[in-house]
Each structure stands twice: as C-alpha cells, then as structure tokens.
Image (cartoon, rainbow, N blue to C red):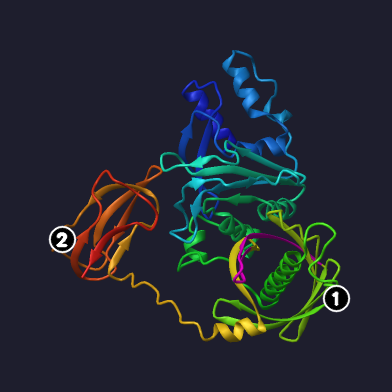
C-alpha cells in the first residue's frame, strides 16, 4: 500500500503531506478509495510509533525544504490506538449528535503514554453547526494488548459533563473479544449489536461490584452530611464501625444489602457475598478510584440526590441506582407509579437540529415507516418516520425552524 501511495503521488506530481486511503477485503486484497491532500485524524498513531512530527514535516515541505528522512530511516516501534470522543448519543443509531455546554471537562493526561488532541476546554459549546468531535484520544504501548489496556484506563478517567458522549460505546468496542483478536470489518457494529447499542451488560460479579460501590458511596455521603464544620458535632457517638441495612434498586431488581464501615473501608454483603470496597472518598472529585476485593476500578459519580438516586459511570456505561434505608424502601412501596408517556401517537425530535422538510399536514394518513420530516444536525440529515399507520392530528414544526432534543414535532390520531 505504501508503494502504491508513493506511485500515485508521483503520477500527479504531488509534493506535500497527503493521505491515501484503501479498502482491504478478507483475502487482503486492497483497493484504492480516495486521497486527501492533507493529514488525516489518524496521524497521531503514525507519530507515536515512528517518533516523527508529521505536522512539522508538512510545514517544512511547504516552505521548500527537503524531507529529512528516507523511508528506510523511519522506525516502527510498538502499537498505538486512537478513539474519537464525540458528543454523540451511542444509544441512538450508534451516534446521533448531542449539543450543549461542557460544564465539566477533564482529559486523562495524568496517565502515562496517553495523548489527547482537542480543540475545546471546560465551558466550550458543542453546537449544531459543526462536527461534534470532542477530541482524539491516543494511547501507546509496546504491544497491541498494552495499548488497548491503556485506552481502557484513559476512557475510564475521561470526564465529560454537559453533553451526551460516546465513551461507553468506545469502551465496549475495545474490550470486545472480536476487536481484541482483530476479527473486525466495516460491519462490526451491526454484527455485534443487531438491535442497537444497549450499553455494558453486567455480569453477576460486576453487578455486585456496582451495587457495593453505590452502597458505600451512599453511606459515606450520609456520614459526611451528619458532621458539622468546626469542632462541634451533631452527636458525640462515633459514626464509624456502624451497621446499616439498605435496599438497592437497579433496573427492575431490588437487593437487600448490609454495610459496615471502618475508616475508608466499607464491607458490603450482597446476596450472601461479601465485598470490601476501599477508597479515599473525595466526594468533590468527579473521579472515584476504588479497590473492590483487590481489583482497582475507576468510577464516576455523575449525580446523587436526597432521594437516594445515584448515577454512576461504571465500566464506561451509566447506571442508575437507587439506595434506600430498609424503612424508606418499605414506605416507598406505597407510592403511586408514574405512568409513562404513550409515544406511539407522537413524534419528538431525537436530537437538536434544524427542520429541513415536513412531508405531512393535518388530516393526512401516513403508513408505518413513512417519512414524516427530516432533521439536519452537524452536516447530517436524519429522516424521521411514523411508528404506525394513523392520521396526522397536528404538525408543530415547519422547515427552517430550530428544534431541541425532545421537542414535539408531530401528533397522530
């Protein structure tokens, strides 16, 4: 491929930085796809394994200088991998755009052999008018396995708040056995997730780890709230080494949990299994480094409230856990359940964007799967369709309007 790329550049007398792209089939035959007369977003990988600064070389050539290296002088050492961190919702068609302010942003640059190429900072606005890429995240290692392990740590340590991002999907891809073995193709996503991406599916041990972390965090938060700043305290009774009985809700499941705490160690018993959760418990930090039964885990607490609801990022995916005392759980069973909205007769915008076209008007009859309107966001047009055969009751949008995620567009009878 390298030889073909050089021959192509010579044939058209091109003498600057460029990227030639090929497609490769299952028999390792390769075919020319296109050439870009610039560096591509993957160039940091080449820089990591060769030690060259390609941007510097591009500028030198543009100024008329000769290249400082020949092909045989360029070494290839180790492995590098790059992921693109995007402001996208991976649960919607593997990545519909998300917009908003980066209310909190922290790159994992504290880790060794990690590189982040970004053009944003905390407080930046991700708008509907430009590509929603947040950064290029690159990790390097002596082997492919080492580079992947470092990428896993980097994604766990990457803090992005204010927009929906694709870190959960990136982490699932790089830890999937097929990706690790190199058995990948352009059909990887539809092959692995034929019904769409659903996030990380917890194994039994992982579920216990998540619940134990939530219980320990809840107890630590409760103890902190009972203390008074200064020398005075709400009670002279020691708060450590106490015992709690809790109920934890995760999805449709409810688990009875017992917790004891001593120093920075919480012992949590779930379903007859005891887990020891250690941590410094800095509740002001977005990162929550824990050791669970000797295994190091990096969690992120996105939110917690007085009702016991905690949102944790664990293994890249967001999980909603509710922690209640035994008494509160008993009383909660008497609370009326909120009836979910019937969405079969309404169409809401799945993303922020601009209405490009509206194909129906009140009184029209639409078939299931028929296009109703088109929303454009970040240079992509998305066709929205009817979920059933029905008559159009109301149209709440028109071409040229800007809409937000969740805005009501069409009502059906």
Q: Position of residue 339 (x, y in %)?
A: 40, 77
Q: Is residue 304 magenta?
A: yes
Locate the C terminus and report the quarter of the image it occupies: bottom left
Q: Secondary structure at mark 1?
A: loop
Q: Which mark is residue 171?
A: none
Q: Residues within 10 Å of mark 1 (few under 14, many from 20)?
A: few
Q: Please tell me which residue lies in front, 235 or 294.
A: 235
Q: Closer to the camera, 225 or 303? A: 225
* Quadrant of residue 220 within the rendered picture: bottom right
Q: To which residue does mark 1 refer?
A: 241
Disc 2 on helix, strand or loop?
loop
Q: Position of residue 186 (x, y in %)?
A: 49, 54
Residue 3 x %, y %: 58, 33
Residue occupying the far front of the picture: 232
Quadrant including the N terminus: top right
Location of residue 113 by image quarter: top right
Per the rendered image, the range of residues in magenta is 295-312
Residue contact at pointers 1 and 2, CB within 8 angstroms: no
Question: Is residue 173 depicted above or below 250 in this figure?
Answer: above
Q: Residue at x 65, y 83 (%)?
A: 255
Q: Predominant secondary structure in magenta?
A: strand
Work out whether mark 1 precedes mark 2 in sequence or the reverse, and give the earlier one.
Answer: 1
Q: Residue at x 44, y 60 (%)?
A: 92
Would you place residue 14 above or below residue 404 in this image? above
Q: Which mark is residue 362?
A: 2
Whether the magenta-drawn stretch holds residue 412 is answered as: no
Is residue 212 left or right of 39 when viewed as pictured? right
Q: How far apart are the alpha carbons under marks 1 and 2? A: 66 Å
Give the total of numbered labels: 2
Where is residue 252 shown, x and y percent of the image? 54, 80
Residue 243 vs 127, above or below: the answer is: below
């Amino acid at each position: 491929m390298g030889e073909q790329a050089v021959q192509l550049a010579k044939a058209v007398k091109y003498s600057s930085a460029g990227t030639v792209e090929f497609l490769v089939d299952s028999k390792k035959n390769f075919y020319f796809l296109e050439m870009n007369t610039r560096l591509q977003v993957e160039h940091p990988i080449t820089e990591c394994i060769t030690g060259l600064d390609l941007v510097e070389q591009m500028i030198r050539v543009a100024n008329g200088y000769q290249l400082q290296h020949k092909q045989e002088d360029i070494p290839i050492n180790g492995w590098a991998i790059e992921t693109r961190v995007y402001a996208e919702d991976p649960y919607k068609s593997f990545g519909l755009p998300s917009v908003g302010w980066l209310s909190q942003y922290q790159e994992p640059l504290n880790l060794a052999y990690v590189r982040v190429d970004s053009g944003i900072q905390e407080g930046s606005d991700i708008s509907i008018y430009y590509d929603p890429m947040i950064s290029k995240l690159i990790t390097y290692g002596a082997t492919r396995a080492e580079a992947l392990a470092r990428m896993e740590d980097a994604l766990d340590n990457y803090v992005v708040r204010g927009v929906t991002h694709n870190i959960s999907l990136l982490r699932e891809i790089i830890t999937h056995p097929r990706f690790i073995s190199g058995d990948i193709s352009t059909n990887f996503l539809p092959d692995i997730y034929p019904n769409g991406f659903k996030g990380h599916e917890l194994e039994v041990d992982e579920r216990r780890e998540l619940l134990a972390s939530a219980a320990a965090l809840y107890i630590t938060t409760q103890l902190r709230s009972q203390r008074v700043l200064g020398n005075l305290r709400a009670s002279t009774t020691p708060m450590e080494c106490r015992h709690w009985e809790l109920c934890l809700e995760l999805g449709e499941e409810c688990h009875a949990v017992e917790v004891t705490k001593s120093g920075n160690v919480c012992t949590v018993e779930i379903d007859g299994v005891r887990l020891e959760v250690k941590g410094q418990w800095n509740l002001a930090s977005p990162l929550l480094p824990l050791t669970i039964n000797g295994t190091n885990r990096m969690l992120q607490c996105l939110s917690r409230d007085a009702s016991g609801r905690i949102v944790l990022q664990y293994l890249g995916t967001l999980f909603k856990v509710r922690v209640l005392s035994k008494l509160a759980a008993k009383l909660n069973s008497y609370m009326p359940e909120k009836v979910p909205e019937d969405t079969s007769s309404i169409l809401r915008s799945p993303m922020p964007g601009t209405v490009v076209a509206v194909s129906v008007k009140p009184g029209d009859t639409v078939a299931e799967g028929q296009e109703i309107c088109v929303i454009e966001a970040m240079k992509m047009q998305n066709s929205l369709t009817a979920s059933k055969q029905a008559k159009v009751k109301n149209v709440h949008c028109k071409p040229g309007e800007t809409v937000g995620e969740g805005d009501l567009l069409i009502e059906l009878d």
